[in-house]
Structure formats: C-alpha cells, structure tokens
Image: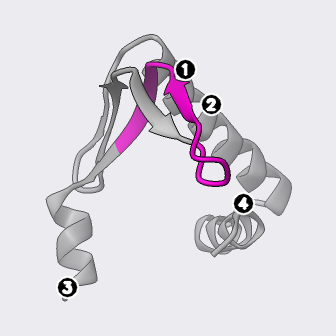
C-alpha cells in the first residue's frame, strides 16, 4: 500500500473526503516526526511505539573501490509493533 492508497482507505473507512484524509494523515506524520525530533517517544496503545535510537559513528568501506570511509553518528527512527497489531496479523 502506498500513500495514495492509504489516503483512499482512510477516506472510505472514516467518511472523510480524500482531501481531509490527506490533511489528517500529513498532520499525523508531522506530529510523530516532531515528537521524535524533540526526543520524545510516541506510544499508540495497541498499535506500536515510535522512538529514536542513536547510531554511533563507524568506519565502513566503499564497495566499489574498497576505500575506507567514516560514517557519521546519527539518530535513527525505530518502530516496535504493539500486541494489538501483532495479534491482528496472526489472527
């Protein structure tokens, strides 16, 4: 499912127009990204949790040339599925 298909599905299930569903989805994504950027965790009970993990700087290799390169430290988004989502997939 891509973003357009998600918007259509949300519009059909909620009775919203596609434009309103698009605004709701964009606002949800923006709120999650904003919370993660400020260091907060987003917990959606029954669905899952979004958090930020720290990735330390490391040394890698360019696969084409074999040259060593430095990979900078970074913050990575992480998602952990909740029990409700896991149960829905295995029902």
Marked residue nearer the N-terminal end (1 or 4): 4
Which stretch appears magenta? 62-78
Note whether 37 is above or below 78 in the view shown.
above
- Observer-nearest residue: 37 or 87? 37
Identify the element where label 3 is drawn: loop
Marked residue nearer the N-terminal end (3 or 1): 1
Q: Is residue 16 magenta?
A: no
Q: Which residue sits furthest right?
A: 19
Note whether 41 is above or below 17 in the view shown.
above
On residue 90, the disc is 3
- Mark 2–mark 1 Cα distance, whole angstroms, equals 6 Å
Residue for point 38% across, 14% down: 39
- Observer-nearest residue: 1 or 25? 1
Q: Which residue is mark 2?
A: 30
Q: Which residue is mark 4?
A: 16
Q: Nearer the viewer, mark 1 or mark 4?
A: 1
Quadrant into which the N terminus falls: bottom right
Mark 4 touching mark 2, by CB under 8 A? no
- Mark 3–mark 1 Cα distance, whole angstroms, equals 32 Å
Q: Which residue sits furthest bottom?
A: 91
> How would you rate the neighbour count of disc 3 (Cα within 10 Å): few for under 14, some for 14-19, many for 20 or more?
few
- Mark 3–mark 2 Cα distance, whole angstroms, equals 30 Å
The image shows residue 18 at horizontal and vertical percentages of: 81, 61
Mark 2 touching mark 1, by CB under 8 A? yes
- Observer-nearest residue: 86 or 54? 54
């Amino acid at each position: 499912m891509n973003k357009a298909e998600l918007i259509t599905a949300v519009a059909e299930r909620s009775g919203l127009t596609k434009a309103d569903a698009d605004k709701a989805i964009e606002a949800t994504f923006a709120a999650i990204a904003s919370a993660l950027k400020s260091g907060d965790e987003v917990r959606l009970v029954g669905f899952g949790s979004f958090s930020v993990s720290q990735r330390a700087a490391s040394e890698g290799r360019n696969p084409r040339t074999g040259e060593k390169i430095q990979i900078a430290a970074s913050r990575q988004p992480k998602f952990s599925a909740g029990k409700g989502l896991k149960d829905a997939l295995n029902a």
